[in-house]
Image (cartoon, coloured by chain):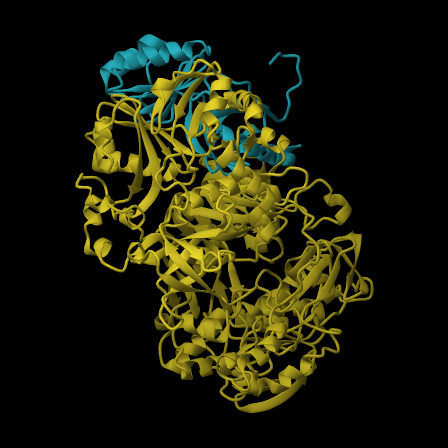
């Protein structure tokens, strides 16, 4: 945001379609880790609920899953094929989930308050600092929440089938902060 | 100060702003109060003695208390559509234009048509409705009783307010901001902990704001305000006033409701939510919830003009109201003397009736110095007048009568431990206080101040500080002089009230004991004491003390009921928040939602998805549309959005082995591109899904599940992988919404697909085959499987490409009579074909062999295989899938109809699905029938409600049984 622009108290933005790749493997598997590092330049974070990298970034989703974000769409196939070839479908996988999740960004001084109206997880800066990731519920639907490194905004990845509802419900919750 | 506006304002109440008068109406009468008043204080100030009628006997009732414990002064606030049907007048802040009316009185409070019920009280004891009114039959009387039951009247319009919710987290949650709560909050905050301080009243301070007394040499109110001011400056403290904590749950989750705009006059509420529900998760909870005064029990102790002594004091000190001109104080403990001193100062004359033989020490000297007239060893024998006009009492065996207009009573104080009990805390009976005090709590909960049975002001403050640092504090001194246990007067026990709110008397408790309802939980249900709005805040202890007395047990042996949320009534609106109307629950939308709407789809909810039920053409009925769609599929081609079907990718070097163990379909033996159908079972061999498995590569499969079973099957697979087979290297990834799925079904489906994309490798396709490639330049997977009984192609494409494919197929299908079809048509097609719908044909006991013969012979070792060999699964008489055709071939059999061999024999099964078949021209049904497969051709009776039918048993497949069309 440019310095001269007025700070909006709360902004809910539905982001354009972007590439998302789910990497499956075990963090203790050297082959898998090496393949991911080589293909993405990022080592899969081992600490639960954390992320690594900025663009692209790898979000810890489960002990055997990482969400790769911030790739050009053209690289999806390269990385998918690269990982599958190296691991021979035996010890890991890459699955294109670009269409599965919609991306909503909540930004502004009251963004944490908005999330507190509809999410049972504490997403304040203290409890959910930059680089944090959590799979939780917001407005009653499953979401992956992420506060990217270098940002104060909260990014939500919502199942596409729920996105219309989630977007509408978040805006209704935001009425309180209008 | 003399009286203000000629009423009962006797002095300058600490909480009243006399510069701000407020006009309001009560039962249509225009009255005036002041900013800072509650409705109750304003009514008292206007000499309104009778404010409502009791629940059961419609006895006139006045204001008893000054807080949330009020059992009598229940009123309706507001006018449609903004109505609070049952509110406590003691808890309603006065605002300009407030409209209030009494409950339970018709046509008016003064002349209530049901007042005569009190005369019939001997015939209406507790539980009367359980055991009488047997003639002519209960229904005759229940109509009247139910009409009389209930309090308040619901608004006739939908709630026009909106409500919000908020989650919050803190290190320490302090509930209550009296002396103990303030000191606990400040001590905690000074250590840097994050604090949430919850206070029911509009201002922090609790009783410190009006009670006389000093804290460490400082006036109590001044001390409280300085503490509150310091807390307000601290960034780590969030103070929530007008907020009531009403529920304490596991993991120190406390629910509270904040009244945001209830206290504002309507024009000022614009744009504001009415209330906010807080869900606060705290590492440590400190309960500084104070204590509630108990009334003494004596004949006619429910008359208007009888109030709790502490409330009389509060109305005087806080609201400047003298509740009576000729007051009598009836007490068994020292605390009521504070009220006596205050009344003496304001009113001049006060008589104290003390149940004790004598008071001693400092209190006795102070009473003597103040000129308080005390009668010891006293009992009230009766009360005259409504409202109170005189009191009959005895002292040392000598009876007397005294004119009075106020009786202030005190039987001691009950620590407010509802939240403590909800948190799992156990209570101990304290003989000195004659009430229950906290003992041990399994959660991180500490109790401070009066809630801990501590009644000395400075010890209360210290106990708050101690709670903040986790120190124990001696509960001594508690209530100086203790509480004198007063035996209840034995005579006229049916006119001595324990629970004012529910009209429960001593006699009702005695009856409960005689009927052997001697558990305190049974007492509550039998007599209704402690139920409803006030939850027994003033009655519970008296009730169980009397139960203990009549059953010869100690109060500790009797115990208390388990307190349940909510501590105070909570509106449904606050609980619902914004989860109302179209946001009542999350509905999933198809990726092609807009296209379906454009196509004229009538949408319906199925398994959480909003889906086309049928596509209406020029005002068609549902039946006509379904018929058209079904025939299009049977004769030409149909297009169906099957995107919600579950899709799970299974990958890893042990994927074949994993699937062999999960399903009895030998996935490891499948060729690449092969698809197999299988009935997924749980470990009890009960069917949980009708799935298809396709092999994409040696170590990669995709499972297509039914819509509802996708998450279930993925979760079961993950659980088995993590807990049962952790050695397997397998990755399970649900991808249901990454892919859209479009089904092209019908004899012309291949023509349409070929028209849409002329480059498809048909040699690689075939029934139960999968091909991966591009369709119309879109990455796709084509499954040639069928849910309709016709040749069909289920085409998976990335969700965002679905619209392009749908439009291309629509265009290509134009020449072939393609019609989109909805769920109703699909259901008809599958029933004609005899395909099961899991959860419709099956239930929690159906095993694969019941619906698909021969599956019990599978000797592969898979989940549920062992259970499939249990005698229960193999016994004769099991319900098996069959078809039914009604005898006249015209009547559609109702779903749910019971099947029997004859009218006299027991049920042998039931109809699960039933349609009017457009293809066959007559109705058919599927049913689960005992030994059904052995009874093909048998004629059976069916019963549904009062209707009877007869039908012939057939094989379940009514259409193309050879499968030639697949």
Q: Nearer the viewer, residue B164 or B539?
A: B164
Instruction: Please name the residue shown 38% across and 67% down the image.
Output: B429
Asked if residue B332 is positioned above or below residue A80 in the image, the reply reads below
For the question of whether residue B496 can be seen, the reply is yes
For the question of whether residue B243 can be seen, the reply is no
Asked if residue A8 is positioned above or below residue B165 in the image, the reply reads above
Residue B308: x and y in percent read 59, 69
Q: Nearer the viewer, residue B708 or B114?
A: B708
Instruction: Please name the residue shown 41% across and 67% down the image.
Output: B560
Instruction: Please name the residue shown 58% across and 49% down the image.
Output: B574
Chain with yellow colouring: B
Chain with cyan colouring: A
Q: Nearer the viewer, residue B365 or B822?
A: B822
Instruction: Please name the residue shown 58% across and 73% down the image.
Output: B500
Residue B371: x and y in percent read 63, 74
**Location of the N terminus of chain B (image quadrant):** bottom right
């Amino acid at each position: 945001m440019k310095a001269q622009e007025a700070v909006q108290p709360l902004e809910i933005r539905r982001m354009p379609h972007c590439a998302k790749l789910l990497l499956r493997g075990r963090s203790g598997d050297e082959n898998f880790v090496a393949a991911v590092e080589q293909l993405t330049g990022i080592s899969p974070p081992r600490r639960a609920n954390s992320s690594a990298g900025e663009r692209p970034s790898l979000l810890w989703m489960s002990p055997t899953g990482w969400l790769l974000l911030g790739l050009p769409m053209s690289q999806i196939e390269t990385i998918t094929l690269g990982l599958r070839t190296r691991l021979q479908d035996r010890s890991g996988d890459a699955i294109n989930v670009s269409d599965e999740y919609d991306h909503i960004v909540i930004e502004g001084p009251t963004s944490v308050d908005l999330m507190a109206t509809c999410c049972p997880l504490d997403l304040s800066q203290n409890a959910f600092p930059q680089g944090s990731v959590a799979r939780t519920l917001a407005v009653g639907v499953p979401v992956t929440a992420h506060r990217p490194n270098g940002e104060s905004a909260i990014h939500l990845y919502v199942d596409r089938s729920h996105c219309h509802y989630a977007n509408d419900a978040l805006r209704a919750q935001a009425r309180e902060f209008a | 100060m003399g009286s203000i506006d000629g009423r009962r304002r006797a002095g300058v109440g600490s909480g009243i702003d006399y510069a701000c008068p407020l006009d309001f109406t009560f039962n249509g009468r225009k009255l005036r109060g002041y900013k800072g008043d509650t409705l109750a204080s304003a009514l008292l100030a206007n000499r309104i003695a009778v404010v409502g009628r009791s629940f059961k006997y419609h006895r006139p009732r006045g204001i008893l208390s000054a807080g949330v414990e009020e059992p009598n002064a229940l009123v309706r606030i507001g006018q449609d559509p903004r109505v609070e049907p049952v509110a406590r007048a003691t808890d309603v802040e006065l605002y300009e234009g407030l409209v209030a009316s009494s409950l339970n009185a018709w046509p008016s409070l003064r002349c209530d048509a049901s007042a005569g019920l009190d005369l019939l009280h001997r015939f209406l004891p507790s539980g009367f409705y359980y055991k009488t009114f047997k003639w002519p039959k209960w229904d005759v009387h229940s109509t009247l009783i139910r009409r009389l039951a209930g309090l308040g009247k619901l608004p006739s319009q939908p709630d026009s307010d909106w409500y919000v919710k908020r989650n919050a987290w803190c290190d320490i949650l302090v509930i209550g901001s009296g002396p103990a709560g303030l000191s606990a909050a400040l001590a905690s905050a000074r250590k840097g902990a994050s604090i949430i301080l919850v206070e029911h009243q509009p201002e922090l301070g609790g009783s410190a704001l009006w009670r006389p007394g000093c804290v460490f040499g400082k006036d109590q109110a001044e001390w409280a305000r300085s503490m509150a001011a310091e807390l307000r400056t601290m960034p780590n403290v969030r103070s929530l006033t007008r907020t009531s904590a009403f529920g304490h749950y596991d993991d120190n989750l406390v629910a509270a409701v904040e009244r945001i705009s209830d206290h504002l006059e309507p024009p000022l509420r614009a744009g504001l939510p009415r209330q906010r529900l807080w869900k606060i998760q705290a590492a440590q909870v400190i309960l500084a919830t104070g204590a509630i005064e108990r009334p003494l029990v004596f004949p006619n102790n429910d008359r208007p003009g009888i109030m709790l002594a502490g409330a009389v004091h509060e109305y005087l000190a806080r609201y400047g109201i003298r509740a009576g001109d000729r007051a009598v104080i009836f007490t068994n403990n020292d605390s009521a003397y504070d009220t006596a001193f205050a009344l003496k100062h304001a009113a001049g004359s006060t008589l104290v009736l003390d149940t004790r033989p004598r008071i001693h020490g400092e209190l006795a000297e102070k009473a003597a110095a103040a000129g308080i007239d005390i009668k010891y060893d006293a009992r009230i024998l009766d009360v005259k007048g409504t409202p109170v006009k005189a009191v009959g009492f005895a002292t040392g065996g000598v009876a007397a009568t005294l004119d009075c207009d106020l009786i202030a009573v005190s039987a001691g104080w009950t620590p407010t431990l509802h939240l403590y009990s909800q948190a799992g805390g156990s209570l101990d009976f304290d003989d000195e206080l004659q009430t229950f005090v906290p003992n041990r709590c399994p959660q991180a909960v500490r109790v401070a101040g009066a809630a801990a049975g501590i009644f000395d002001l400075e010890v209360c403050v210290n106990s708050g500080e101690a709670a903040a640092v986790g120190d124990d504090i001696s509960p001594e001194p508690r209530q100086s002089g203790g509480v004198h246990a007063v035996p209840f007067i034995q005579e006229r026990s049916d006119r001595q009230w324990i629970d004012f709110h529910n009209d429960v008397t001593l006699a009702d408790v005695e009856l409960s004991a005689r009927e052997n309802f001697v558990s305190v939980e049974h007492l509550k249900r039998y007599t209704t004491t402690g139920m409803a709005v006030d939850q027994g805040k003033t009655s519970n202890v008296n009730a169980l003390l009397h139960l203990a007395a009549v059953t010869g047990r100690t109060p500790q042996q009797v115990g208390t009921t388990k307190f349940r949320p909510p501590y105070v009534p909570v509106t449904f609106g606050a609980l619902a928040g914004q989860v109302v109307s179209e946001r009542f629950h999350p509905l999933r939308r198809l990726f092609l939602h807009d296209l379906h709407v454009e196509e004229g789809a009538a949408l319906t909810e199925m398994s959480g998805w909003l889906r086309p039920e049928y596509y209406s053409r020029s005002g068609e009925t549902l039946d006509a549309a379904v018929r058209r769609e079904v025939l299009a599929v049977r004769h030409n081609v149909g297009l169906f959005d099957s995107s919600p079907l579950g899709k799970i990718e299974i990958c890893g070097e042990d994927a074949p082995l994993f699937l062999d163990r999960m399903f009895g379909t030998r996935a490891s033996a499948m060729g690449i591109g092969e698809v197999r159908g299988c009935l997924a079972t749980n470990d009890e061999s009960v069917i949980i899904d009708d799935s298809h498995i396709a092999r994409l590569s040696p170590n990669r499969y995709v499972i297509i599940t039914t819509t509802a079973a996708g998450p279930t099957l993925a979760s079961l697979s993950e659980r088995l992988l993590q807990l049962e087979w952790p050695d397997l290297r397998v990755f399970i990834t649900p991808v249901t919404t990454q892919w859209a799925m479009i089904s092209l079904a019908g004899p012309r489906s291949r023509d349409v697909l070929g028209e849409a994309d002329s480059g498809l490798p048909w040699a690689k396709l075939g029934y139960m085959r999968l091909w991966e490639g591009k369709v119309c330049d879109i990455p796709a997977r084509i499954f040639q499987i069928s849910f309709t009984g016709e040749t069909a192609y289920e085409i998976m494409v990335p969700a965002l490409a679905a619209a392009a494919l749908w439009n291309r197929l629509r265009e290509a299908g134009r020449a072939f009579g393609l019609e989109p079809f909805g769920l109703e048509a699909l259901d008809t097609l599958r029933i004609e074909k005899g395909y099961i719908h899991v959860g419709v044909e099956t239930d929690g006991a159906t095993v694969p062999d019941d619906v698909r013969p021969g599956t019990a012979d599978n000797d592969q070792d898979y989940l549920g295989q062992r259970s499939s060999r249990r005698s229960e699964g193999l016994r004769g008489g099991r319900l098996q899938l069959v078809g039914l055709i009604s005898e006249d071939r015209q009547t559609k059999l109702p779903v749910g109809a019971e099947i029997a061999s004859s009218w006299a024999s027991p049920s042998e099964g039931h109809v699960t699905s039933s349609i009017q078949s457009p293809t066959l021209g007559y109705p058919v049904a599927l049913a689960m029938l005992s030994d059904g497969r052995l009874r093909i051709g048998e004629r059976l009776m069916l019963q549904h409600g009062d209707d009877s039918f007869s039908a012939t048993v057939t094989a379940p497949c009514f259409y193309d049984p050879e499968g030639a069309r697949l």
